[in-house]
Amino acid sequence: MVNVLRLTDVSYVRDRRPILDGINWSVDDTERWVILGPNGAGKSTLLKLATSTDHPTSGTVEVLDEQLGKIDVFELRNRIGFVSSATGRRIPAGETVRDLVLTAAYSVEGRWNEVYEDIDVRQAERILAEWDLDGFADRTFSTLSDGERKRALIARAVMTDPEMLLLDEPSASLDLGARERLLQMLSGFAESPASPAMVMVTHHVEEVPPGFTHVLMLREGRIQAAGPISDTLTAENLEATFGMPFDLTVTAGRFAAVARP
Ligand SMILES: Nc1ncnc2c1ncn2[C@@H]1O[C@H](COP(=O)(O)OP(=O)(O)OP(=O)(O)O)[C@@H](O)[C@H]1O
């Protein structure tokens, strides 16, 4: 087991308001974490620290064994796969899905005059097939549905064999079928021992893919509970996190929560 992320006594303060407070959390390479919490809990801020796009106000953040503030974050970011709603907005309109995935090998968005090695082209084709995108390879990114776009962005993120894959609400805005399809693919990816450590932010227990191993529950910038999903994702912890009582059920590894009358 190799530690990929460690936050020690982390706080993040803006406008004198603690957005994250007293965070102690670590992730190793065999773990797949879900970060669950209500709007404004600090989930995306936590991912910003994990992707090294921001620094804590106090405490230490170690990413892939490097301490933020002491290393070249640009080099570090090449070792991290990250997908958020903002990622898709940076893709040039005419970019084909094949090039979207392939250009990750050069860390660029938008194909120019780069010459790609056969090994990169084969890797891109393999990943397109893995994420069920081979039929879309020649389509431009802008013509894809939201569900297809999410899969394409994840395919791009895994193209460089990242050591950690971070996903900020990957199933937000997807219809039921597209969501279920994406969750099945994330589940398969999470279950593979060859996959990197994963951290996925969501608002909904229904979106926890089987194969994810741990959950961190966040409320108002503080950790309410963190640990293996089997012991930690409970009705009591959901109530503490979302501030209302729920009936929680688990069917074939999938969770569902309904407010208690
Ligand atoms: N740079 C900043 N300056 C001021 N406030 C900020 C800043 N960044 C985040 N916040 C505030 O911190 C809180 C947490 O934001 P964050 O986006 O991390 O929450 P979240 O849990 O991801 O929310 P959501 O589920 O709605 O996306 C919010 O109230 C947000 O307005």
Image (cartoon, rainbow, N blue to C red):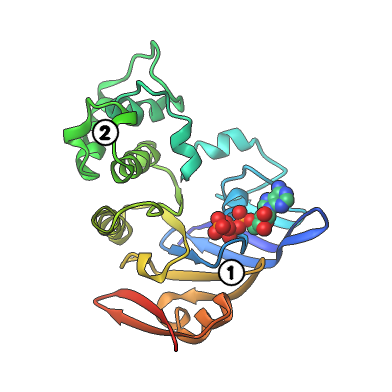
Secondary structure, mark 2, is helix
Quadrant of the image occupied by residue 148? top left
Quadrant of the image occupied by residue 101? top left
Which residue is more in the foreground, 154 or 14? 14
Position above or below: 215 against 171: below
Which numbered disc covers residue 218? 1
Q: Where is residue 60 shown, x and y percent of the image?
A: 71, 56
Q: Is residue 226 visible?
A: yes
Q: Amino acid at mark 1?
A: Leu
Position above or below: 33 against 88: below
Which residue is more in the foreground, 160 or 225? 225
- Residue at 45% x, 47% y is 163
Residue found at the very far front of the displayed protein: 261
Q: Where is residue 32 shown, x and y percent of the image?
A: 41, 62
Residue found at the very far right of the displayed protein: 16
State which image quarter holds ligand 1: bottom right
Residue found at the very far top of the displayed protein: 113
Secondary structure, mark 1, is strand
Q: Where is residue 146 shown, x and y percent of the image?
A: 33, 43
- Residue at 26% x, 33% y is 123
Left or right of 127: which side holds 231? right
- How far apart are the two marked residues, 1 and 2, measured between alpha carbons? 37 Å
- Residue at 34% x, 14% y is 115
Q: Amino acid at mark 2?
A: Gln
Position above or below: 213 against 146: below
For label 2, the residue is 123
Q: Is mark 1 within 8 Å of ligand 1?
A: yes
| Comparing labels 1 and 2, the label whose residue is closer to the camera | 1
